[in-house]
Amino acid sequence: MSHIDPTRESFDQFKSLPRDHPIDMLNLISLHEMARYPDGRAATGADAYAMYGQTSAPVFQRVGGRIVWRGAPQCMVIGPQDGLWDIAFIARYPSAAAFMEMVTDPVYQKDAVPHRQAAVRDSRLIRHAVLEGEDRFG
């Protein structure tokens, strides 16, 4: 089963959490080799995801979002060996309300989301509260 867009239940859970403090969103993305646009246009999944990045950037920046970490997955040390992600990053938002503003923005919905939906084979988006003490595990 692929996970591309949030379910109603998971989005309702997100909305039930506090909206007035910074959040980090861990993004794990697996891309289609070839994008799957409904109109049949040809593009690689990587190219379609790059278009998503370009078209979502103005809204992302306007709401105060920023990328705090990006990585290129290389090897699954713990986990299913067939589950390596193509893209991994953490986006920080000044608040959950800012994230909500981005994902409900009409320009984001119209111009960016179709590229993401065409590009992504599977994904995980995990909300995290920002904690102090970056130099410890617990």
Image: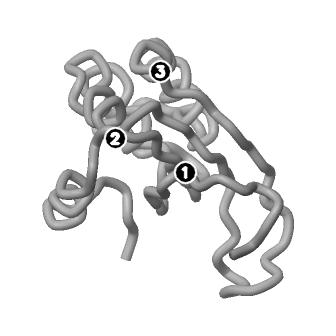
Q: Is residue 37 above or below residue 125?
A: above
Amino acid under disc 3: Gly
Is the C terminus in the top left, top right, bottom left or bottom right quadrant? bottom right
Task: List x then y, in percent, for residue 24.
Answer: 52, 47
Amino acid under disc 1: Val
Between 94 and 58, the one lying in front of the other is: 94
Task: Name the mark nearer the viewer: 1 or 2.
Answer: 1
Q: Is residue 39 above or below residue 134?
A: above
**N-terminal of the two: label 3 or label 1?**
3
In the image, taking residue 129 as reference, residue 74 lies left or right, namely: right
**N-terminal of the two: label 1 or label 2?**
2
Is the N terminus in the top left, top right, bottom left or bottom right quadrant? bottom left
Question: Residue, x 33% and y 20% (percent of image)?
Answer: 111
In the image, taking residue 65 as reference, residue 19 lies left or right, namely: left
Other residues around mark 3 within 10 Å, as few (<14) / some (14–19) / many (≥20): some
Q: Which residue is mark 3?
A: 64
Between 35 and 55, the one lying in front of the other is: 55
Question: Residue, x 27% and y 50% (percent of image)?
Answer: 18
Q: Indicate the secondary structure of the residue bearing disc 1.
A: loop
Question: Residue, x 70% and y 70% (percent of image)?
Answer: 84
Alpha-carbon distance for marks 3 and 1? 15 Å
Question: Residue, x 39% and y 69% (percent of image)?
Answer: 2
Count of residue discs: 3
Q: Which residue is mark 1?
A: 130
**Badges 3 and 1: C-beta atoms under 8 Å apart?**
no
Numbered tag placed on residue 96 in the rendering: 2
Q: Indicate the secondary structure of the residue bearing disc 3.
A: loop
Please tell me in which quadrant of the rendered image residue 63 appears.
Answer: top left
In the image, taking residue 40 as reference, residue 94 lies left or right, namely: right
Please tell me in which quadrant of the rendered image residue 81 appears.
Answer: bottom right
